[in-house]
């Protein structure tokens, strides 16, 4: 590790601001370093700013955080107790009414229908910048400090999903790492578990089952709400199915179903959208991975029917699972029609990761180009490239 003086010389050569060197520390200030800032006292605002800085690169990345880094931050979250809030920084006091306005406005943006949320990215970025600026420069007491950290975590989590949907996976990972820092600083264990669930979902989406299982085990250790536990068990079942661990997958699915069926308390905001539709469809997705296409299709059909119309992005993903199951069973025309419907929905909500997922079905239709609906789907795939 270079000493502080030599690090500043390196920073001059690389064109890095000295403040970033002292704030982030070695090696996190280095350009091109994708490791997240470690969880712990004094790094929360640095992590929030670092996520923003990396996102400014605005490049599509097909990799998220490295599995080792993902496991490390999950383990830190599961074992570290947050320190007391830092003493107020110099600057003007934050009016509670202003924080209330920020909270209300941000909540409105994050709960819009899926098709509308694609247009809120710049607004969310500006809210995020405002909140992090208040944490950096404003004077606030313990109550307002906690509110600002919760709001920063919520915004970082939502922005992470925006980046994820557009396949900026590294940026998404850093925003979720920042959200985890802020939730930890606010002593919001439930929200922290939700952020870990998002990181695990990204890992599953990218085909990395093992780190997802580790992350979800850590999240389950500190999560008591039944709805939240159901979602975490369901995500774990998905990862186990990808690994071909059928018995463990079924145990996780049973735990997810039991937790959701017995839930009587209000779920945390981060999983308030979760319901039996998600449980049914993701159970079907597990069965696809376990080569049980018939039962999978039954589960997926049930779930799609239960899904509210406001969740079109999720519907596109669910319909893709249905099309894959139909394709495996040889129902080519029905599969092509379902895949085409999924692709149109994904294009409407502007989620490139969903478009890529649906287009990935195209090779399976190549031998069946004379079947009704196949050419229409393949033509739409070509225009989506």
Image (cartoon, rainbow, N blue to C red):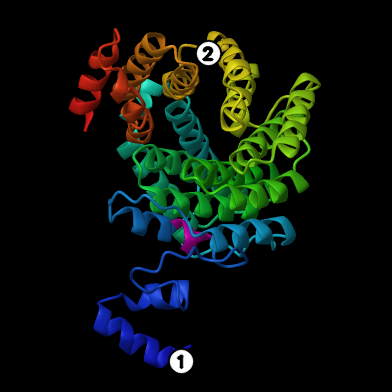
The residue lying toward the viewer, choosing from 312 and 150, is: 312
The quarter of the picture where residue 378 lies is top left
Q: Is residue 29 above or below residue 329?
A: below
User: Which residue range is magenta in the image?
Assistant: 44-48
Between discs 2 and 1, the one toward the N terminus: 1
The residue lying toward the viewer, choosing from 188 and 62, is: 62
Q: Is residue 169 left or right of residue 227?
A: left
Packing grade of label 1 (10 A; few <14, some 14-19, many >=20) is few
Q: Residue at x 29, y 25 (%)?
A: 366
Packing grade of label 2 (10 A; few <14, some 14-19, many >=20) is many
Between circles 2 and 1, the one closer to the viewer is 2
Taking the magenta stretch, the answer to whether it contains residue 284 is no
Query: Which label is found at residue 371?
Result: none
Q: Secondary structure at mark 2?
A: helix
The residue lying toward the viewer, choosing from 308 and 83, is: 308
The quarter of the picture where residue 106 lies is top left
Q: Is residue 378 left or right of residue 238?
A: left
Question: Quick one: quadrant of the C terminus?
Answer: top left
In x, y percent, where is residue 48? 46, 56
Kindly identify which residue carries mark 2.
Answer: 304
In x, y percent, where is residue 359? 32, 29
In space, the residues marked 2 and 1 are separated at their CA atoms by 58 Å
Residue 304 seen in this snapshot: yes
* Main SS, magenta residues: helix
Q: Secondary structure at mark 1?
A: loop
The quarter of the picture where residue 85 lies is bottom right
In x, y percent, where is residue 292? 61, 24
Kindly identify which residue carries mark 1.
Answer: 3
């Amino acid at each position: 590790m270079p000493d502080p003086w030599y690090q500043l010389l390196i920073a001059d050569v690389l064109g890095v601001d000295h403040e970033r060197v002292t704030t982030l520390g070695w090696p996190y200030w280095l350009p091109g370093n994708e490791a997240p800032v470690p969880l712990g006292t004094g790094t929360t605002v640095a992590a929030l700013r670092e996520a923003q800085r990396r996102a400014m690169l605005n490049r599509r990345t097909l990799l998220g955080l490295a599995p080792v880094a993902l496991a490390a931050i999950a383990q830190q979250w599961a074992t570290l107790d947050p320190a007391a809030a830092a003493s107020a920084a110099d600057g003007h006091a934050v009016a509670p009414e202003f924080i209330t306005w920020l909270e209300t406005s941000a909540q409105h943006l994050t709960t819009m229908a899926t098709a509308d949320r694609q247009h809120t990215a710049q607004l969310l970025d500006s809210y995020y910048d405002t909140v992090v600026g208040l944490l950096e420069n404003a004077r606030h007491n313990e109550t307002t400090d906690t509110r600002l950290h919760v709001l920063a975590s919520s915004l970082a989590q939502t922005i992470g999903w925006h980046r994820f949907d557009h396949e900026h996976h590294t940026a998404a990972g850093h925003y979720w790492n920042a959200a985890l820092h802020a939730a930890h600083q606010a002593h919001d264990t439930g929200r922290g578990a939700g952020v870990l669930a998002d990181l695990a979902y990204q890992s599953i989406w990218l085909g990395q089952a093992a780190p997802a299982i580790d992350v979800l085990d850590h999240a389950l250790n500190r999560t008591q709400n039944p709805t939240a536990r159901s979602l975490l068990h369901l995500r774990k079942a998905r990862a186990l199915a990808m690994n071909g661990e059928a018995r463990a997958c079924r145990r996780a699915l049973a735990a997810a179903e039991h937790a959701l069926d017995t839930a009587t308390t209000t779920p945390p905001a981060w999983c308030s959208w979760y319901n039996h539709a998600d449980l049914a469809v993701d159970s079907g997705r597990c069965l696809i991975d376990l080569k049980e296409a018939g039962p999978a299709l039954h589960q997926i059909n049930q779930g799609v029917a239960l899904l509210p119309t406001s969740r079109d992005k999720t519907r596109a993903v669910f319909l893709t699972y249905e099309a894959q199951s139909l394709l495996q069973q040889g129902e080519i025309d029905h599969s092509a029609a379902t895949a085409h419907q999924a692709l149109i929905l994904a294009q409407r909500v502007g989620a490139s990761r969903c478009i890529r997922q649906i287009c990935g079905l195209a090779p399976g239709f190549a031998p069946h180009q004379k079947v009704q609906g196949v050419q229409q789907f393949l033509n739409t795939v070509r225009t989506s490239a």
